[in-house]
């Protein structure tokens, strides 16, 4: 029986978030005690897959997890997009397995060389925080979207006030005539 530890989902919308995702993955894989060269290869392969998917889909996501059962822990990445899930050739060179997953997603995995992966609760919490941490670009985008929503709401309120003012003037004029 394989137990899956889910660390979170990385959202990718543009080149800046793609770079951020690559860095998050590299640091996550290094935290799993994988050597730096392999960690870089994994991050670059995931980045190449996301770039390929971004040609067809506005937003791409990578669900990050570790599957463990006894002596065979595996890094698992699930690529999610509305379209464009054809595999980048680099995936085959870096990951042990790749297969279609639920909902048309693409799931890749790689065996971790140190067979006794026993993550502590602190390790899991720290890595989840790393994966879920929003980048500066994401935070700026969120602020921009909120400002745009506030501007739309302000415009609607101004229009409502103008309409009500016209109604009030009409009612006032009608009351004065009566």
Image: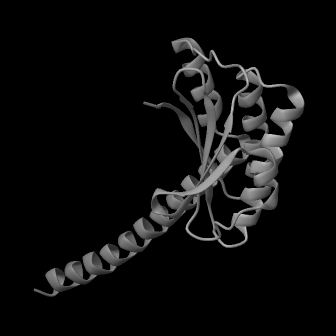
Front residue (pair 55, 36): 36
Looking at the image, residue 127 lies above or below residue 15: above
What residue sits 79% from the left and 38% below the top? Answer: 23
Looking at the image, residue 138 lies above or below residue 119: below
Query: In the visual, does 171 lie left or right of 46?
Result: left
Looking at the image, residue 136 lies above or below residue 69: below
Residue 76, picture quadrant? top right
Could you tell me how many numbered marks the image carries? 0
The N terminus is located in which quarter?
top left
Front residue (pair 93, 85): 93
Front residue (pair 16, 47): 47
Expressed as whole percent of the image width and height from the top left, the position of residue 151 reads 54, 62
What residue sits 36% from the left and 71% below the top? Answer: 160
Query: In the visual, does 136 lie left or right of 5?
Result: right
What residue sits 17% from the left and 85% below the top? Answer: 174
The C terminus is located in which quarter?
bottom left
Q: Using the rendered image of the protein, determine whether residue 16 is visible from the camera's viewpoint.
A: no
Looking at the image, residue 154 lies above or below residue 43: below
What residue sits 46% from the left and 57% below the top? Answer: 102
Expressed as whole percent of the image width and height from the top left, the position of residue 108 reads 64, 48
Residue 85, picture quadrant? bottom right
Expressed as whole percent of the image width and height from the top left, the position of residue 33 reads 75, 20
Among all residues in the image, which is located at the extreme right? 37
Expressed as whole percent of the image width and height from the top left, the position of residue 26 reads 78, 34
Q: How is the image coloured?
A: one colour
Front residue (pair 170, 85): 85
Query: In the visual, does 20 lie left or right of 74?
Result: right
Q: Using the rendered image of the protein, determine whether residue 31 is visible from the camera's viewpoint.
A: yes
């Amino acid at each position: 029986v394989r137990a899956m530890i889910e660390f979170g989902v990385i959202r990718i919308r543009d080149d800046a978030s793609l770079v951020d995702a690559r860095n998050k993955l590299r640091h996550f894989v290094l935290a799993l005690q994988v050597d730096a060269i392999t960690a870089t290869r994994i991050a670059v392969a995931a980045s190449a897959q996301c770039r390929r998917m971004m040609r067809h889909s506005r937003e791409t996501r990578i669900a990050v997890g570790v599957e463990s059962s006894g002596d065979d822990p595996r890094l698992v990445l699930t690529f999610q997009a509305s379209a464009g899930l054809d595999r980048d050739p680099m995936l085959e060179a870096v990951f042990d397995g790749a297969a279609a997953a639920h909902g048309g997603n693409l799931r890749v995995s790689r065996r971790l060389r140190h067979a006794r992966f026993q993550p502590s609760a602190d390790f899991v919490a720290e890595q989840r925080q790393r994966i879920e941490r929003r980048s500066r670009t994401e935070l700026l985008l969120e602020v921009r979207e909120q400002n745009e929503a506030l501007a739309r709401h302000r415009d609607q309120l101004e229009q409502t006030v103008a309409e009500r003012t016209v109604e009030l003037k009409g009612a006032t004029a009608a009351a004065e005539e009566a």
